[in-house]
């Protein structure tokens, strides 16, 4: 496994810890996860990438107690999700792929309040937390909108607000932008950026460009942890990318193809500016 | 063509507002637009899974409503979003054989078509496997094979790459290119402009149920570069100071144009 101690590391004991985690689905011939060990420290933002069938979703299900490991251990806080799923789910908020699956209430504010209602929280406190959560995802003015009239990006922000209202220590994001268009993806990513440092985040995605600011990226392939590296290391390691069926997004591919560094050229604007300056310099 | 959902109820929504569009033989037509722009509603009209509230769908000049539904759906094959949800047979081979068998073909013909279709999709090795034991990308191919084995003249793919890893996505784009070469017309809906840029011969941009733009990828994307693939956004930002960059769309074209610019 590729591993590194470089890059931003937060100190303190891990808040999420998996050790030698192995899991096979019933009647399956090979394990979905084999001997996976890693930890998340409080406040870390960690990405998870890898091919379809690599074990990403299985890992998420083990962390929130939907599945029970065959061997090895999972600890969230000091709790085992398989035996104390309800306690764990109070500390872990989950955001899934499909924006239509998570919304239940007639109005946005009711939807955001739904989880709190189930915890028996005082009405005044509930109002305040809902208001703050709606503000945190930038949906003020949407309180009385009906969720089904919103765009995909807005729906995912409503779902995210519902999580924030519950004030979880840990967020598990399972491809939260994969069904959104480009503008919806940008909206959701901006809101997730704001959570950086405040909460511990594990973000599963097929889009490496969403993880350029992550503290670390875990690569899961064929059920094994193939790498635990910084974004810079992953982007600059062509064979690691190839072995794990990862491709760079177009801007980074153009930058790499032109022999420009990929670290600072993430957006079309940044790449165009760099090329403009370089070609201008050549003309002079 | 218009389409109104839940007409004459309080939930009435006009999803398509007078859309006129011709799909040319042997082209790859990309349908793009934001969430809720009407992409899926539009393509479900192409085989009359949805009937237009106003207007017509013509297939080869004939009003689709005059064609038998079986005939229409054999000629215009539709692959839904997340089509793997409909896989049901014990093996991939049986699943793919289901639709052609309904056409009343002989067993040998059915077997032949299944083999050819799986080979075309690079999925021949999956024939004996259970669909439920496959990875996401393999399931997607098996599901597409089930429609393709009907031998459609037009294959409609609604978000065929959604949820797939990047490398599997590229494999599927190769499949689309292969279909075009083998003479199948492809209509492909995607919210990913970068992949439409790689495969489409023409692009139809929908916005709030109307055709906002229709033309070659270069025409459509350079007309609104703010909502264009990354390649077009980069090149259009450079065009004012460096007009020689041209109007590239595909990644390879764009890379070549930018290399010239940098004198590399």
Image (cartoon, coloured by chain):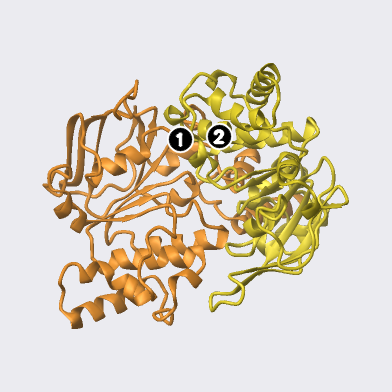
Chain colours: A orange, B yellow
Q: Quadrant of residue A71?
A: top left
Judging depth in this view, the residue of B225 and A161 nearest the camera is A161
- SS under mark 1: loop
Q: Which mark is residue B120?
A: none
Q: Residue at x 58, y 74 (%)?
A: B12
Asked whether the beta carbons under mark 1 and mark 2 sit within 8 Å of each other, the answer is yes
Would residue B78 be found to the left or right of residue A13 on screen? right
- Place of residue B25 in the rendered image (x, y in percent of width and height, measured from the top left): 84, 43
Badge 2 crowding class, 10 Å Cα cut-off, few under 14, some 14 to 19, many 20 or more, is: many
Q: Quadrant of residue B256?
A: top right
Q: Circle 2 sits on which residue?
A: B168
Badge 1 crowding class, 10 Å Cα cut-off, few under 14, some 14 to 19, many 20 or more, is: many
Disc 1 and disc 2: Cα gap in Å?
8 Å
Task: Please identify the quadrant where the C terminus of chain A is shown.
Answer: bottom right
- Place of residue A38 in the rendered image (x, y in percent of width and height, measured from the top left): 25, 37
Q: Circle 1 sits on which residue?
A: A52
Is residue B13 among what the camera can see?
A: yes
Would residue B49 be found to the left or right of residue A230 on screen? right
- Place of residue A262 in the rendered image (x, y in percent of width and height, measured from the top left): 54, 45
Q: Residue at x 22, y 53 (%)?
A: A42
Query: Eyeballing the image, is B98 above or below A162?
Result: above
Chain on which label 2 sits:
B
Query: Eyeballing the image, is B74 above or below B131?
Result: below
Numbered label tally: 2
Chain on which label 1 sits:
A
- SS under mark 2: helix
Judging depth in this view, the residue of A103 and A7 nearest the camera is A103
Judging depth in this view, the residue of B58 and A129 nearest the camera is B58
Q: Residue at x 30, y 44 (%)?
A: A60
Task: Please identify the quadrant where the N terminus of chain A is shown.
Answer: top left
């Amino acid at each position: 496994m590729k591993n590194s101690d470089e890059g931003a590391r937060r100190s303190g004991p891990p808040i999420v810890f998996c050790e030698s985690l192995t899991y096979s689905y019933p009647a399956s011939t090979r394990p979905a996860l084999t001997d996976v060990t890693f930890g998340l420290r409080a406040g870390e933002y960690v990405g998870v990438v890898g091919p379809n069938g690599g074990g990403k979703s299985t890992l998420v299900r083990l962390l929130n107690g939907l599945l029970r490991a065959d061997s090895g251990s999972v600890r969230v806080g000091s709790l085992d999700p398989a035996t104390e799923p309800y306690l764990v789910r109070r500390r872990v908020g989950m955001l899934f792929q499909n924006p239509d699956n998570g919304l239940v209430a007639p109005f946005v504010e009711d939807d955001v309040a739904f989880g709190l209602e189930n915890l028996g929280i005082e009405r005044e406190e509930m109002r305040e937390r809902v208001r703050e959560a709606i503000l945190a995802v930038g949906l003020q003015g949407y309180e009385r909108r009906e969720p089904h009239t919103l765009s995909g990006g807005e729906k995912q922000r409503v779902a995210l607000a519902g999580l924030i209202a519950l004030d979880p220590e840990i967020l598990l994001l399972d491809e939260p932008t994969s069904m959104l268009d480009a503008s919806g993806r940008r909206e959701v990513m901006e809101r997730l950026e704001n959570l950086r440092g405040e909460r511990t985040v594990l973000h599963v995605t097929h889009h490496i460009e969403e993880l350029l600011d992550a503290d670390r990226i875990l690569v899961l392939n064929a059920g094994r942890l193939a790498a635990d590296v910084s974004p810079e290391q992953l982007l600059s390691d062509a064979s690691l990318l190839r072995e794990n069926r990862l491709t760079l997004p177009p801007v980074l591919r153009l930058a790499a193809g032109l022999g420009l560094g990929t670290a600072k050229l993430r957006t079309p604007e940044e790449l165009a500016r760099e090329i403009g300056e370089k070609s201008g310099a050549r003309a002079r | 063509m218009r389409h109104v959902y839940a007409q004459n109820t309080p939930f009435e929504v006009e999803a398509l507002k007078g859309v006129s569009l011709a799909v040319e033989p042997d082209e790859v037509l990309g349908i793009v637009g934001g969430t809720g722009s009407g992409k899926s509603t539009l393509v479900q009209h192409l085989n009359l899974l949805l009937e237009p509230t106003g207007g017509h769908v013509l297939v080869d000049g004939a009003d689709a409503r005059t064609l038998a539904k079986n005939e229409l759906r054999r000629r215009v094959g539709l692959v839904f979003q997340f089509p793997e949800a409909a896989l049901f047979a014990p093996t991939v081979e049986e699943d793919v054989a289901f639709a052609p068998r309904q056409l009343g073909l002989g067993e040998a013909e059915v077997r032949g078509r299944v083999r050819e279709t799986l080979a075309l999709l690079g999925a021949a090795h999956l024939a004996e496997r259970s669909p439920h034991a496959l990875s996401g990308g393999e399931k997607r191919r098996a599901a597409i094979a089930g429609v393709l084995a009907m031998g459609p003249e037009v294959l409609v793919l609604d978000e065929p790459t959604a949820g797939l890893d990047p490398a599997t996505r590229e494999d599927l784009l190769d499949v689309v290119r292969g279909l075009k070469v083998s003479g199948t017309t492809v209509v492909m809906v995607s919210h990913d402009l970068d992949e439409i840029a790689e495969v489409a011969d023409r692009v139809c941009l929908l916005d709030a149920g109307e055709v906002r733009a229709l033309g070659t990828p270069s025409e459509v994307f350079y007309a609104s570069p703010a909502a264009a693939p990354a390649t077009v956004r980069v090149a259009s930002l450079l065009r004012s100071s460096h007009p020689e960059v041209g109007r590239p769309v595909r990644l390879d074209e764009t890379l070549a144009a930018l290399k010239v610019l940098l004198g590399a």
